[in-house]
């Protein structure tokens, strides 16, 4: 059974509480202004950060609208006047907007038969780590496709190695070019096996899968079971 507190216990508790109050009062006198300033600074910083986030969001929305308007102008035939706007967005836009603007300028270059300029734009996208990876991978595919005939087979294979794997979203395109490079090297069996792997991968576009069945077969690798009978 608990014992009732003695007068000594009560006295010590009152002394302890008084000491705590005195410490709190002294701390407030000594650091009160500093604490108020710190709180105010925190609130200002928080407000500034929220404002900056909102401005960034608003700016991103404006850039997307500008990009959409530019695409409309291009579709209506106003290609040349759209290039300066695309170049500006490619310079100052958010990561995704920059990538889209660069892709658009590359497409315009291809339309004008300026392959060198298009390759430069795709290379710029592929080499910019601030741009989301799906854009970089797509740019690398497009760059390699345009440069394929001028590249050594080993360069194609090394460049596309991360993408030419089953399950990768770009396995079809990267695998197709890699298999062609292997064929150029005289590695027909490896090329055939890669085409068979593409034929079996259901994430690969159907047109590439069916072609891979035919190419694999011509190289001595049977991949016909990868395609349903109705599609053969």
Image (cartoon, grey):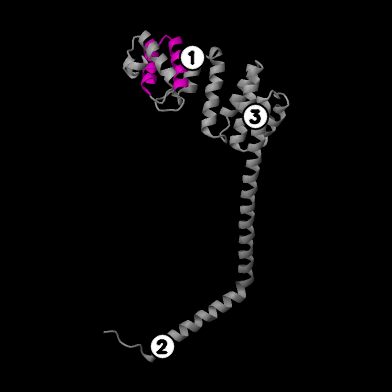
Specify the label residue 10 is tagged with: 2
**Residue drawn 54% across the image and 19% down it:** 144
Q: Mark 3 points at which residue?
A: 71
Q: Do the residues labelled 1 and 2 touch (CB within 8 Å)?
A: no
Q: Name the main secondary structure of what is drawn in magenta.
A: helix
**Residue drawn 60% across the image and 31% down it:** 100
User: Marks 1/2: CA distance?
Assistant: 90 Å
Specify the label residue 153 is tagged with: 1
Residue 126: image quadrant is top right
Q: Which is more foreground, mark 3 or mark 1? A: 3
Q: Does the magenta stretch include residue 197?
A: yes
Q: Where are the magenta residues, as a range?
A: 172-201
Looking at the picture, tell me which residue is in the foreground, 123 or 202.
202
Q: Within 10 angstroms of label 2, few (less than 14), some, or many (20 or more) residues? A: few
Image quadrant containing the N terminus: bottom left
List the single residue furthest toward the right: 81
Q: Within 10 angstroms of label 3, few (less than 14), some, or many (20 or more) residues? A: some
Q: What element carries label 3?
A: helix
Q: Do the residues labelled 3 and 1 touch (CB within 8 Å)?
A: no
Residue 232: image quadrant is top left
**In the figure, is residue 55 to the left or right of 22?**
right
Specify the label residue 4 is tagged with: none
Can you give x and y, in whole percent of width and height, for residue 155 in the image? 50, 18
101 w.r.t. 197: above or below: below
């Amino acid at each position: 059974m608990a014992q009732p507190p003695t007068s000594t216990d009560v006295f010590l508790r009152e002394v302890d509480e008084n000491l705590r109050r005195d410490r709190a009062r002294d701390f407030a006198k000594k650091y009160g202004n500093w604490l108020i300033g710190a709180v105010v600074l925190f609130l200002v910083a928080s407000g500034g950060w929220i404002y900056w986030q909102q401005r960034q969001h608003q700016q991103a929305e404006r850039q997307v609208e500008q990009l959409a308007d530019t695409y409309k102008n291009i579709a209506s035939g106003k290609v040349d006047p759209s290039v300066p706007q695309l170049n500006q967005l490619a310079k100052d836009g958010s990561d995704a907007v920059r990538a889209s603007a660069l892709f658009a300028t590359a497409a315009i270059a291809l339309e004008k038969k300026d392959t060198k300029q298009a390759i430069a734009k795709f290379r710029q996208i592929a080499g910019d780590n601030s741009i989301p990876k799906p854009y970089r991978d797509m740019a690398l595919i497009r760059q390699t496709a345009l440069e394929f005939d001028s590249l050594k087979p080993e360069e194609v294979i090394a460049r596309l190695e991360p993408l030419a794997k089953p399950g990768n979203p770009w396995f079809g395109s990267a695998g197709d070019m890699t298999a062609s490079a292997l064929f150029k090297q005289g590695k027909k069996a490896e090329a055939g096996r890669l085409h068979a792997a593409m034929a079996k991968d259901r994430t690969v576009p159907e047109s590439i899968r069916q072609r891979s069945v035919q190419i694999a077969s011509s190289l001595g690798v049977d991949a016909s079971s990868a395609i349903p009978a109705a599609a053969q």
